[in-house]
Image: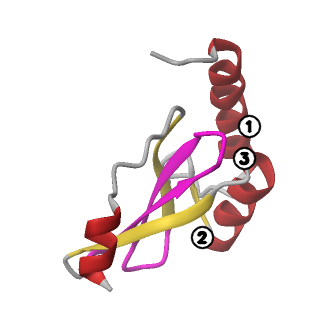
Amino acid sequence: MARYPVFRSFKLAATAVLMALLPLQAEAQIGCGARDVIVARLGQLFQEHQIGYGLVGQAAVVEIYVSAAGTWTVLMTDAGGQTCIMGAGDSWESTLTASVKDRDS
């Protein structure tokens, strides 16, 4: 499915490095840490920027970050302020149409 298998391998390896560099608590899930640190690294390593976010009740915020190259990352920040990488990949395709954007404006 990936158009660039070498890039996908790089993305997975870089994500592993990103997770290893994050400050982690002993009991925390891998890929969790301070939101500002995670967001900064997504920008530095992958040139990803936020394209949207949504609330999960009053428990969490989910954010989606993408790059022009097609990489993407989903973050979730809980009510306590901890941010975790929930998923990451490549070949992002936007399906949002102009009519939906106009309706929401």
Magenta segment: does it hold 104?
A: no
Tell me which amino acid carries mark 1. Answer: Val
Tally the numbered discs: 3
Name of the residue lying farthest toward the bottom: 105
Cα distance between the residues tagged 2 and 3: 16 Å
Tell me which amino acid carries mark 3. Answer: Phe
Residue picked out by circle 1: 17
Image check: 35 left or right of 18? left
**Vertically, is 3 above or below 61?**
above
89 or 99, which is in the foreground?
99
Q: Give the magenta-colored segment's residue range.
A: 59-82
Residue picked out by circle 3: 46
Please give the label number shown on residue 35: 2
Name of the residue lying farthest toward the right: 44
35 or 104, which is in the foreground?
104
Q: Residue at x 53, y 45 (%)?
A: 72
Q: Residue 74: horizontal and vertical position, in percent? A: 45, 53
Q: Earlier in the sequence, mark 2 or mark 1?
A: 1
Cα distance between the residues tagged 2 and 1: 17 Å
